[in-house]
Image: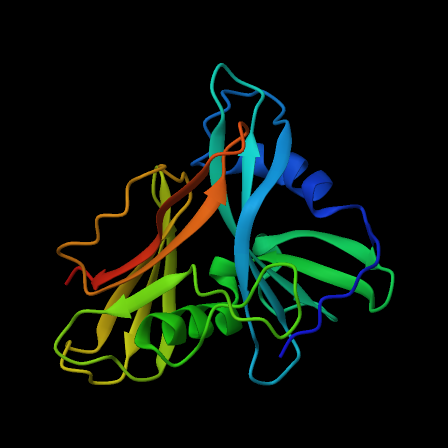
Amino acid sequence: MAVIHRTTLTPTKLELLTTWLPAQPWYGGDGRRPELTKAGGFRLDDPQGEVGMEFMVVTDVSGDRPVSYHVPLTYRGAPLEGAGHALIGTAEHGVLGRRWIYDGTHDPVLVAQLHALVAGDAKAQHQSLSDTPDPAVTAGFTGAAAPGPIRPAAVAEAPYATDIVVDAADGGLGGRLTMRVTRVLRPGEADVAGVLGHVVAGWRLPDGAEVRGVFAVVTDAPR
């Protein structure tokens, strides 16, 4: 299980995301500098114990109405080869030293564990507590059979999401799936009808209200 250290991170995750977020195609700030607050999320464990993984929700309050963004992050102790385009930044961790922080949709460890969560082979962990499952995160696979291990094949940005195409073991699905990671979260939209798999979780609005929505779905990949 991942250990959550009570220490400093310099610069902070919110500071890094304030610079990174406006360059993303699904950011709706129209050139504004975001004003971000942490709004929720959860973690997954790396079976090898090397990569930190956080599915973070940040809310931008710079505009006329708040907008909540879902940003999967990975934390590594060394650069991920071939992933320079996905680097959000580096930071100094008070216990672990320098960490390389990536957009997790491009990190094969996070992609594999997100797939494992949907397939029922991994459990969501509390965002801020060590060794504590988060039962509020619900996931499932509704196809004929849960797919086996996967290999990431491509990543593409959509207006409000990021599509990760993966090659899967048989699972009765023809070998190729799309894991669509929601980027712009919609409170109350948790309808997962018609998809093969899903992840639903919660976050907090600026007024303190607790809401839920779809963080990711799995569909057949386009042929």
The answer to whether residue 111 of the structure is visible from this angle is yes
Question: Residue 184's x, y, as percent?
Answer: 41, 38
**Location of residue 113 with respect to 21 vertically, above or below:** below
Q: Measuring 58% from the left and 20% from the top, which residue is drawn there?
A: 62
Taking the image as shown, residue 116 lies to the left or right of residue 126, namely: left
The answer to whether residue 56 of the structure is visible from this angle is no
Q: Measuring 63% from the left and 33% from the top, which residue is drawn there?
A: 36
**Location of residue 163 with respect to 51 vertically, above or below:** above
Q: Measuring 70% from the left and 47% from the top, which residue is drawn there?
A: 13
Taking the image as shown, residue 141 lies to the left or right of residue 181, namely: left
The image quadrant of residue 189 is top left
Compare residues 183 and 106 and report the one nearer the observer.
183
The image quadrant of residue 141 is bottom left
Question: Residue 16's x, y, as percent?
Answer: 70, 43
Question: Residue 47's x, y, as percent?
Answer: 55, 84
Question: Residue 197's x, y, as percent?
Answer: 25, 65
Taking the image as shown, residue 33 lies to the left or right of residue 66, namely: right
Taking the image as shown, residue 116 lies to the left or right of residue 74, namely: left
